[in-house]
Amino acid sequence: MIKEKHNNATAGANLEIAGGLSRPISRRAALRTGVLGGVGLAAASGVSSSLAASPKSGDYPPLKGRIKHSVVRWTFKQIPLDELCVAIKQIGFSATSHVPPNDWPTLKKHGVDCSLCWGGIINISRGWANANEHEELVERCTKQIDFVADAGYRNTVIFSGNRRGMDLEEALTNAEVGLKRVLGHAEKRGVTLVMSMPNRIDFPDYLCSNPDWGVGLCKRLGSPNFGLLGDTYHMQLTRGDVIGTIRRFHEYFVYFHTGGVPGRCEIDDRQELNHTAVCRALVDVGYKGYFSQEFIPTLKDPTNAELIALLTKAIHICDV
């Protein structure tokens, strides 16, 4: 994982000192001193200092509305959920994901969608490609579909599971047979099953790391309520050609995650993917699903304000 570098000569923020002079300071120092938001005012008004010190809507243009933004909860778990929801709405979008059901009332209080639900699974290695798992998965997934639909949400994640020496065609048939047992119910309840596609380096035996296998399954199932989870970090590690893959297979992707390469770091210019170009490609092909930030901040001991600033920057990098 890469570490953030600071260059005070080009940081772009100045701190006023005695005599009317100024000296350049780092973005981090600006956040800590309130240059980017006014923590002192927050203390007087009772507003959360992390929100007050974060970039305001006036620091960026309004979101264009062509990308449906979201953020994965676990990467910002330091921030209390109430506070994160307020920040999300201030930035200009209204979704987060991977939020446990006991916290769904907090999302509803703030008008924030749970864009991808987590549940109804066994684990990443035990999935639909293994026929021995089907009975348990059918029971779990059926309950999850109802749970998600009853809450008013629309997407829930699933896994192919590991290959375990299986022939690829056998694994594809197994997944088709198993998923057809629950897809009718998903269609009836308006829930989409989203197949996770982690990379083959960190998950070498996972079946659906290759979009070709996933697209083959999509074609066999032929359901609008089944699709693939494209993750820019995982896609780059598995085969590269992220934009080419989007253009080739866009109709089969129903959800996207971000992550800088290497290290799933921030999606800024210190990593190798151009997320602005990726998002332009998604808009060009007519993608309508969520595009959710899942980068892992590399700052050491960050404040909540710094995390919200990173999220704000990432959203605007992807807003095309």
Image (cartoon, rainbow, N blue to C red):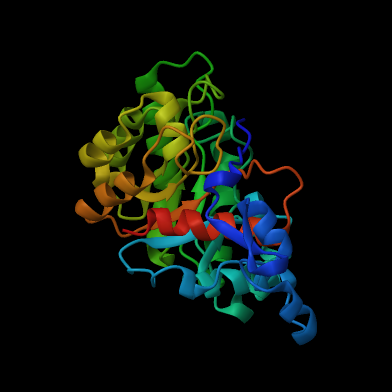
Does residue 155 appear in the picture of this structure?
no
- In the image, residue 304 sits, relative to residue 285, either above or below, namely below
Is 13 or 199 nearer to us in this picture? 13
Which residue appears farthest toward the bottom when viewing the image? Answer: 45
Residue 8 x %, y %: 60, 45
Residue 83 x %, y %: 68, 70
In this rendering, would 172 be left or right of 252? right
Looking at the image, how many numbered discs can be counted on the residues? 0
Q: Quadrant of residue 230?
A: top left
Which quarter of the rendered picture does the C terminus lie within? bottom left
- In the image, residue 186 sits, relative to residue 220, either above or below, namely below
- In the image, residue 104 sits, relative to residue 231, either above or below, namely below
Is 226 or 300 nearer to us in this picture? 300
Q: Quadrant of residue 229?
A: top left
Is 102 or 50 nearer to us in this picture? 50
Is 180 or 157 nearer to us in this picture? 157
Residue drawn at the location 25% of the way across and 47% of the way down:
281
Which residue appears farthest toward the top when viewing the image? Answer: 165
In this rendering, would 139 be left or right of 196? right
Residue 145 x %, y %: 52, 59
Residue drawn at the location 36% of the way across and 59% of the way down:
319
Which quarter of the rendered picture does the N terminus lie within? top right
Residue 147 x %, y %: 58, 64
Residue drawn at the location 28% of the way across and 35% of the way down:
245
Residue drawn at the location 30% of the way across and 45% of the way down:
277
Q: Quadrant of residue 30?
A: bottom right
Does residue 67 appear in the picture of this structure?
yes
